[in-house]
Amino acid sequence: MNMIPTQRQRLVVVGNGMAGMRTVENLLRLAPQRYDITVFGAEPHPNYDRIALSSVLAGEKTLEEIVINDRGWYAEKGIRLIAGDPVVALDRAARTVTSASGLTLPYDRLLIATGSKPLAPPIPGLGLPGTCAFRDIADVETMITAARTGRRAVVIGGGLLGLEAAWGLKRQGMSVALVHLMPTLLERQLDATAGTLLQRDLDGRGIAFFTNGQTEQILGTERAEGVRLADGREIPADLVVVAIGIRPNIDLARAAGLDVNRGIVVDDGLRTEDPEIFAVGECVEHRGQVFGLVAPLWEQAKICAAQLAGDAAATYVTPPLSTRLKITGVDVFSAGALAAADPADEEITFQDMARGVYRKLVLRSGKVVGVVMYGDVADAAWYFQLLRESTDIAPMRDTLILGRAVTTAASGAAAHDPAAAVAALPETAEICGCNGVCKGTITRTITDLKLTTLEAVRAHTKASASCGSCTGQVEGLLALTLGGDYAGSAGEKPMCKCTPHGHDHVRREILAQQLKSIPAVMQNLGWARPEGCASCRPALNYYLLCAWPGEYEDDARSRFVNERMHANIQKDGTYSVIPRMWGGVTNAKELRAIADVVERYGIPTVKVTGGQRIDLLGVRREQLPDVWRDLNAAGMVSGHGYGKALRTVKTCVGSEWCRFGTQDSTAMGVALERMTWGSWHPHKVKLAVSGCPRNCAEATVKDFGVIAVESGWELHVGGNAGIHLRGTELLCKVTTPEEVLEHCGAFLQLYREEARYLERTAPWVERVGLAHVKARVVADAESRRALHERFLHAQRFAQKDPWAERAAGADAGAFSTLVPAE
Amino acid sequence: MDAVVVDKAGWMEICGMEDIPRQGARVVATATHGDVAVFRALDDAVFALEDRCPHKGGPLSQGIVHGHAVTCPLHNWVIDLASGEAAAPDKGCARHIPVRVEGGRVLLAAAVRR
């Protein structure tokens, strides 16, 4: 075209998914002025990365993070987006499409990108509330909601989708069973050995497998209650996810009389039998093949865009395909043939079952035609390159299976370390399989655009922007290209110098991988220093304690001195002792016992604290067990004034004495303290209860503050009177003391589970937003009850007076000094 | 307290290995060095330092032990257990005292507090 058309042609795109919109993106680059573009989408969302739904379900990404193009992008490009209104009719004679809402638009060119539908087997009960597929945002929202209220999930289907769904639900805290029709998992991508290893690993992570399992019926009448298998076994479930596969969505094309088979039949130019209608993505069938992986979709998008831009010679060829599974910590790769297909084919295998490493190459006429890898996939890109380029492997056959490093060394070249592996790759080596981006493109883009972050490289090249499994290599290229200027990924800040991982990631992995000791965390997450440091060890000890109450054995050696000694160390090495005074109430017997202790042990300073208790300062280490024993004898226990723990519950005298008091704030405070004492937290936690809005107990600068009003109780959260003064925000108002207790337990448990170590409630609430806290603690009664129950469960193990244990002789060596006699 | 043997070379038996927790310490009162912190690392290496941080005198015996280092409980200085030197950028040294293990008994080269 050497003439600028006076009027632009109208391009209508049916389908706002990945293939359709990638075609549009490419088209805008090639011929930005050529078309007026309208996009119809069935889902009410902008264009998002469907592959990353697994990561959303696993809690690794948010929905916002997987949006590819937001609505602003459509506006900026002059594209009309009609989301949430699927096209239901196509009139080829009139060249119009009509949407569900009745909107009819004319087109000059039409692009069908309707994707696929989940396969729905004819199982009775499918469609009941509590059943869903794993295909779109709505499904993921259903699953996450179900995980909040239900405990058990059954996933039907042991393919890529089913496994990722099972893993995501597991990470959402559900107990998960997976039913698979075949004897081994991922049988289309893995051979039996690798499939068995995969099952063993996922079984170890707590997913129960029912292989050779034919689902006969989904149980339940009002909603799904479980599944029954053909052999009679029944598995109870609150959620049933069916993920057995997809089929091309060809309804519109078939109704319009286009040539369809399994998919919409297209030629090498991605054109349907109607020359003005193109189709791309999972809805098409090309030379008898239909598609479910992303790499060929991107290739189709490229060719189709070129065709639409006027390049009639652009030809689509399906690229060789490779598969990875998006389950953190499970490394699987496969490409090409899974096994020798005829006597001329050969297989080379390597296995180290103890380490969980397995590798198989399928050879035909001296070339690699198949790769299956499990456990260690560092060389996947190299093997895949040998496969794609049909390299003659005869010269390296002896060492080929041992990987690139050994093979390179054996060939006489200098061996290279794994970090340099990416440096050694040729410019044409494909780094990002999802988006078909090769090394040269990435390094050139980094240099030309002066990129310095992973996010920028993703934005400009799309490398690592889909499944993310090549992130390490892309970061390697950044480091290689920028040298010392690369600052590392701009994700969550590392916990400390011992690890690149941030707090949230570590907590997720503790749950996901069921890590139950500090050494297990450090080993599995690759701690740089094998014993950690004084910063990460206390954090890990807390995270493990919070994750596995009653199960995890507290590691005193990873506790800061105060929490190990159950007293507060002072500048001269002596300690302070604060007995608990429930709700700030004391009596003559307690005061007399305190006075006796002060005199008996010569305690130099006695001070009333801001939390309505009495602090005994200057107690020597050796004296502590005796001081505690004497205080215990008068009925007093540890006040935990030394811990990242529940400290005090400050109260005013309330309606019992005060002429303004509206409720018995003192009794409320005592009840709160009885429920919460002994609980460990990311940081110290203080409560207060005021009997009227005059707020004499200063409840609005506490972590959880209660203010009595005539009609009930106002609950306030996230206050802090420390370095940064912050008033509380109102959480909600409740009527009964029982509700106060339940909301308090739920709020504290949410804080315990979500805040980072040494983050007080004030910055935590600011970081996650009050709306989030309200959603979990106020709006969702089920969620509140579940949180409160988890809090009470943990308290069963936490409410032991550490002073009594030590006064009785526990850990005596910590308090005594060795005074050897001659 | 168990009877303690001081041999002619001045080695004083202070306790058994099992009396010191791994990644922990015990305090010994001595005449020559005041309180001494005797550490046992995770790998069962044993070290002894004067129980005073070179910074502000904090009791090193109460710190968190990681590898062959301890973090002072008062202001988080990290002290090397073998040399007593503070890790950069902090500067200072806690005096170290010879210690050895023989047949599961821990021996310290220091005189007893009388």
Image (spheres, rainbow, N blue to C red):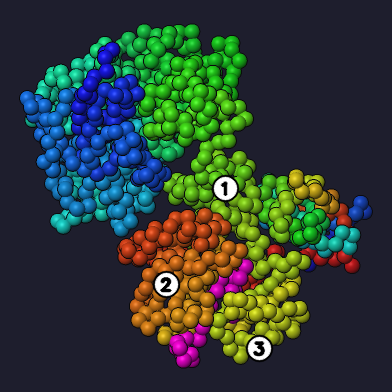
Q: Which residue is identified by label 1? A: A495
Measuring 51% from the left and 30% from the top, which residue is drawn there? A451
Q: Which residue is identified by label 3? A: A592
Q: Quadrant of residue A178?
A: top left
Specify the label residue A715 is tagged with: 2
Does residue A349 appear anywhere in the picture? no
Amino acid type, mark 1? Met
Question: Which residue range is magenta in the image?
Answer: A636-661
3D distance between C-alphas at marks 2 and 1 = 32 Å
Q: Quadrant of residue A297?
A: top left
Q: What main secondary structure does the magenta stretch of the protein show?
A: loop
Q: Earlier in the sequence, mark 2 or mark 1?
A: 1
Q: Say which element carries label 1.
A: loop
A513 on left or right of A585: left
Q: Earlier in the sequence, mark 3 or mark 2?
A: 3
Q: Earlier in the sequence, mark 3 or mark 1?
A: 1
Q: Say which element carries label 2.
A: strand
Vertical arrangement, residue A170 with respect to residue A724, above or below: above
Q: Is residue A654 magenta?
A: yes
Q: Say which element carries label 3.
A: helix
